[in-house]
Image (tube, grey):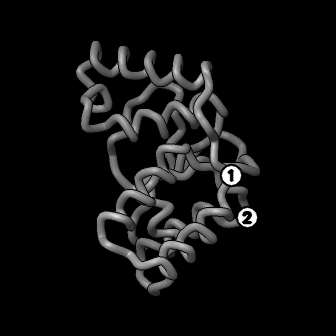
Amino acid sequence: MSSRRRATHVVVDTDAVNWYLDPRPTHTPESARTLIAGRACVVSFMTVTEITYGALLAGWGGLRLRRLERSLESFDVIPTDEQLMKRCAGLRTWAHRAGHPLGQKVHEADRWVAATALVLGLELVAGDGIFEGVPTLDVLRVRPL
């Protein structure tokens, strides 16, 4: 757990949003809900893009898509701006030079999410390890209970 004081807001990565919204009673969604509990959830515009893309690719119907849209309304979506673009570019530069996988093109969405947390100075709730080792990024890792 983070040594930083528990903030009232937290940035939530795409995988954690998926688990958080998952109504099935499994351990991973419950772990995400526990980390997020009592805090306002912030997501990058890229998270909404990824989730919507996945639903469209899976061929979700209109009713299911509308339910997804309503669920996503519970999150504060952070749009891109000049500060966020510069932070994301700087993060990719650092990652490329450091040999960190976050510098790879395949992790474009992850960079936007990480940059969002860094710009806002908030903890990031995530399920995968791609964010490990990023300087000043405070990651709360979702793990099965």
- Residue carrying label 2: 38
Name which residue lies at 68% across and 64% down.
74
Q: Is residue 68 above or below residue 130?
A: below
Name which residue lies at 61% across and 20% down.
83
Horizontal and vertical percent for residue 114? 48, 36
Q: Secondary structure at mark 2?
A: loop
Q: Is residue 7 above or below residue 143?
A: above
Task: In this rendered view, identify the residue nearer to me: 67 or 106.
Answer: 67
- Residue at the extreme right of the image, as rendered: 8
Please state which amino acid type lies under the numbered disc 1: Asp
- Residue carrying label 1: 76
The reply, left or right, for residue 58 in relation to residue 9 is left
Name which residue lies at 25% across and 29% down.
104
Q: Is residue 49 above or below residue 90?
A: below
Q: Residues within 10 Å of mark 1 (few under 14, many from 20)?
A: some
Quarter the C terminus occupies: bottom left
Q: Secondary structure at mark 1?
A: strand
Horizontal and vertical percent for residue 99? 23, 21
